[in-house]
Amino acid sequence: MKRKIELLAPGGDVDAIKAAIIAGANAVYCGLDTFNARNRAANLSFDDLIGVIALAHQYQCEVFLTMNIVILENEVPTLVKLLNQLVNTGIDGIIVQDLGLFNLVSKHFPTLAIHASTQLTTHNEGQIGFLAKIGATRVNLSRELNLGEIKSLTTLAHDHDVLTEVFVHGALCIAFSGQCYSSSVSVGNSGNRGRCSQACRDEYEITAAGNKFPLNLKDNSAYFDLPELVDAGVDSLKIEGRIKGAQYVHTVVDSWRKQIDQFVDTGKLLADDSNLYKVFNRDFTNSFLKGNLTKDMFIDNPRDNSFKHANDISNAISVVQIQEAQHTLSTAKDAIVELVAEKINHLSIAKPPLTLAFAGKAGQTLSITVTTPAQHFVIESDTRLTTATESQIDQAAIEKRFKSLKGTGYLLQPFNFDNLDANLTLPFSQLTQLKNQLLLQLTQREYIGAVTLPKLVKHPKVTETPTLSLLISDEKDVNLCDVTDADVYFKLPESFKKNDNKYIDIFLRNPRLIPWFPAVLIGKDYLESVRLLEVVKPARIVSNNTGVAFKAFEMGIEWIAGPFLNTTNSYALMTLQEQLNCAGAFISNEINRNQIRNIARPANFKLLYSIYHPILMMTSRQCFFQQTVGCNKPSIEDGCMLKCEKATTITNVKGISFAVDKQKGGYPSIYNHEQFLNIEAVEDLSHLFDEFFIDLTNIGSGSKAEIDKVQLVTHFENVLKGVSEAKIELNQLVTVSTNAQYQQGL
């Protein structure tokens, strides 16, 4: 087998990265203490990163930097400063969620390879085209996909010169990544900002099915699925675990390295996966890969399962047997600690010293003698030094221009000026040229100068007075078109019957309705969505799915980016408009008023904002009902999406209940007990937004009584007109509401 299979390992701290390298990882991914989605990991300083890159490259191991969060407008200057440093480090790629980063990197830092994060929820072929167009060189496919879906998308990705990677080991989220807001809603720590508090691992009041941890999945392990992943053409096998320690990382990487090598050499697999059970695990499942979503994917304990597993494999029942099993495992764990410490002890990320000696006299060139432990060379200026009449090349001038060398992989020593005469000068451009020549010889890379972003223009609104729009999901609510001039969006399901014209006919009967596409559309459901576009040929759509958006762009259909695309900055808007001819976008409801105010719209681009909606916490391809109210089916069947419309609640140990909702054709979802109601945004931001939106679908309302929708529309229209009584009337109608996200932001 000739094709390289990359083993990609997590590195939450320096020791974990060393452990991954020495265990045989082909690449590691790690984060700095800013702009990454694992704030709970130790993470690296920038100096650490420089050392890690140098060490990894000695072992032919690549380094990818996680920058996989949404970016706020006021963070862009700091982000650009970081990118200016990164382009000269030799980093092998950056992992990105925010669409604005694609714009910044493609325009200003094209030498940086962009990897699309799992937070972008990539699961259909249109999304591959979308990401390829905006500059992705690699895509981390959604964890929920099965092997057939992975193979299909990988084949397409390769046609676009895009690589694919798949998570093969480690923790599983029950929610679609990038579409989980549970932590943000419940405690103000957004998963889209790397601060997930893992509500899916929380304890809840015991459910009817007898579970205290009804959302807790086992860990993922595709250890015995390697042949199928190779057959699918996957380029990178990714291990989760940036919060895990060096012992975990070494054990898992070493096990996978041996499995890959065995398969490459012999075409056969190792049968023993016992080492994987000696480090943290919640037991293992490969059900997403196999497309067999059973109750067995869950485990009613979020803590380390390794000790229970030790009891099980030893058939330990008595106290003595259990003690022996636990002692054996503890001894094995201690041995792993000692082994890893011994293996990484000699690895260093310390910067080697760099000494520069400057020399020159009038009539001679300026020379720099460069010394490192591995190199010794001299570079000289093209022009000769002359006696200074005004500006001189003194120590301060040289130090100012050469201090940036501190950001290289070397420890800059005090400069030596012993052989440089005073009162000399030469063109200052010669100093820059010498520095660039020095860097090229040291690093074998051309030095890239710092980028300064042009100031963004805040273009005027498309509509002078903000308008109202509303969302429905049932044709019986089409009568609302008769009581308002508002745009009326119709929410499409996440699943369709194949070749069924039900929703096509709804739009053909009701030409005023504007299609609203959900965030997740996998396989046939994406293809049915495309068929709807081709048959209905709507003038405009709203899409929360970038795959459908890409298809609309190809067909010349005007499209608006929906609220679940997590748009939080001006550069994301620029990506959407410049690359995909997007006509407007919803601004994320996760950000607050001050964070919204800083956003600059592109020219002729609408800004929209939702002021009333059920608050989605998470959506899953798994079934929330198996562990809550129970289900007679042993696994999710093809018809479950289309037929099931169960609803229940789960209550956490603080006594707060959440609606678990399943619409026909929808994925199981969990919603906050409060509705989002934000009239303040109308008062604060009417000068910015073209359209304020209200969701009238009843989805996520749980057991709450349905509110008269005509009244709601009337009151919201009056709010936009400035009628003061409308705010009071709305607060009386919507009795359980919040706008906490608008207050706290990200």
Image (cartoon, rainbow, N blue to C red):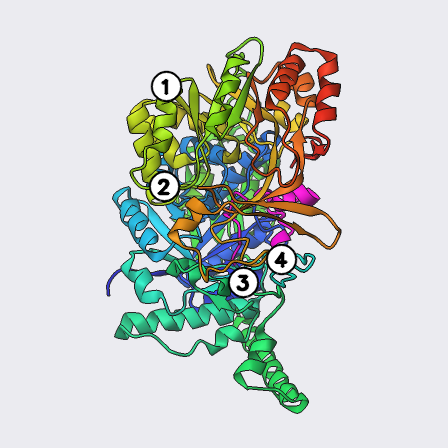
Residue 201 drawn above or below residue 433: below
Position of 216 relative to 192 (above/below): below
28 vs 329, left or right, is: left
| Residue 262 pos. (x, y %) | 33, 74
Distance, label 2 to label 1, CA atoms, is 21 Å
Q: Amino acid at mark 1?
A: Ala
Identified at 67% across, 28% down, the residue is 677
Label 3 element class: loop
Residue type of the residue flagged with mark 4: Arg
Q: Nearer the viewer, mark 4 or mark 2?
A: 2
Picture quarter with the N terminus: bottom left
* Quadrant of the rendered image containing residue 422: top right
Give coordinates of residue 465: x percent, y percent: 58, 9
Between the C-alphas of marks 3 and 2, the distance is 26 Å
Q: Which residue is mark 1?
A: 539
Estimate how packed mark 2 is, as few (under 14), some (14 to 19) or many (20 or more) residues with alpha carbons within 10 Å: some
Tell me residue 582's x, y (percent). 42, 24
Q: Earlier in the sequence, mark 2 or mark 1?
A: 2
Write down the residue under mark 3.
Answer: 298
Instruction: Give me the residue at 52% from left, 15% from top.
Output: 486
Residue in front for this viewpoint, 694 or 39? 694
Closer to the chain start, of discs 1 and 3, is 3
